[in-house]
Image: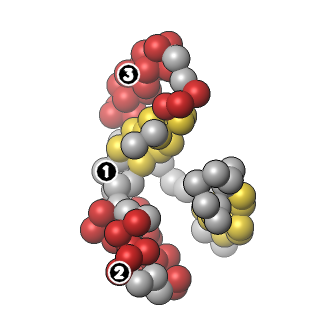
Amino acid sequence: MDVLYLEVKSHELVELHKRLVTIFNPNQEQIMKCFELERYKPHITVARKSVISDSIIETKKELESYVSSVQEFQATHISLFYRADKKEKYKKRADFCLTS
């Protein structure tokens, strides 16, 4: 993979992911291609490996230490991004507020 990310452990996030996937109703090929459902890994994206240096990898180690010390946080919104193919940059499709 060309993405540098921090894996997070969150049952609630996995459940939210499953609900979102259900809304879009992908076929099996799309599920496999896009790492959906059981292949999904909750994470925080840090950077793309193709545009990072060794200093970013050191920063990742520091972030892992910080994230492992944070036990809980509350998200106030989620944003959905998409791209038609891998040559495009991601574009924001929608924002959803999670608080009332």
Q: Is residue 56 left or right of residue 33?
A: right
Element under label 3?
helix
Above-or-below relation of 60 to 81: above
Tell me how the rendering is colored: secondary structure
Going from the N terminus, do you reach mark 2 or mark 1 first?
1
Q: Quadrant of the rendered structure where residue 5 is?
A: top left
Count how many numbered circles sit on residues in the image.
3
91 or 65: nearer the viewer = 91
Residue 87 in percent (x, y) is at 64, 51
Amino acid type at circle 2 is: Gln
SS label for mark 1: loop
Q: Quadrant of residue 29?
A: bottom left
| Label of residue 9 in the image | 1
Q: Amino acid at mark 3?
A: Lys
Residue to which mark 2 is pinned: 28
First in sequence, mark 1 or 3: give its number: 1
Between disc 1 and disc 3, the foreground one is 3
Q: Which amino acid is tagged 1?
A: Lys
75 displayed left or right of 40: right
Would residue 72 be visible to someone looking at this image?
no
In the rendered image, which residue does mark 3 sit on? 61
**Could you tell me which quadrant the N terminus lies in?**
top left
Crowding near the residue tagged with mark 3, few <14, some 14–19, many ≥20 C-alpha atoms within 10 Å: few
How far apart are the alpha carbons under marks 1 and 3? 17 Å
First along the sequence among labels 3 and 2: 2
